[in-house]
Image (cartoon, grey):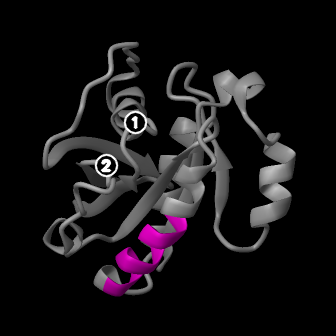
Amino acid sequence: MIRKKICMIGSFSVGKTSLVSRFVHNLFSDRYQTTIGVRVDKKIVSLDGEECTLVLWDVHGEDEFQRIRDSYLRGASGYLLVADGTRPSTLSTAATLDERVRGACGPVPSSLLVNKLDLVESWEESPEAVREKLEGAWDLRFTSAKTGEGAEEAFVELTRRMLDS
């Protein structure tokens, strides 16, 4: 069986843990859980008759006090950058993190997930404006860990791209 490591990267409180929980267990909790270090989950995905075990590394959020360790990123087959649509500053943090992760992992498949689509009325910019601004920079997807919108598709599409590369 094929195994692929996916790292979840982003600022604190953007929904990385919630997206993993939604994808792996189909659950969502309103309680905020700070990730300390890294939390690892697994899920088997079947694509085109081929099974792949995804090892999901939910890495703690980066902020001014805590930097993501390169050792967490080693061996990643792909990564998901996560930003919070209600906090535009997390998009610029994602851009900075993307450069660092590419330096540590090389040219592996990745996507930018702008999370919290269920709170779109609280976004400073509409999803269309965000898409227009970031067009071509990333494989861009909009998700909601709360409703599940776009979450499974983001993981499955990244898996497909990892298997194809």
Query: What residue is pinned by disc 1?
Result: 13
Prevailing secondary structure class for the magenta stretch in the rendered image: helix
Disc 2 from disc 1: Cα separation: 7 Å
Residue 3 found in image quarter: bottom left
Front-most of 75 and 113?
A: 113
Q: Residue at x 29, y 52 (%)?
A: 54
Q: Residue at x 20, y 74 (%)?
A: 70
Kind of residue indicated by mark 1: Ser
Front-most of 153 and 91?
A: 91
Q: Which segment is the magenta one?
A: 94-103
Residue 29 found in image quarter: top left
Which numbered dot is residue 67? Answer: none
Q: Residue at x 50, y 67 (%)?
A: 110
Dot 2: element: loop
Q: Where is residue 2 drawn, in percent x and y?
A: 26, 63
Query: What residue is pinned by disc 2?
Result: 61
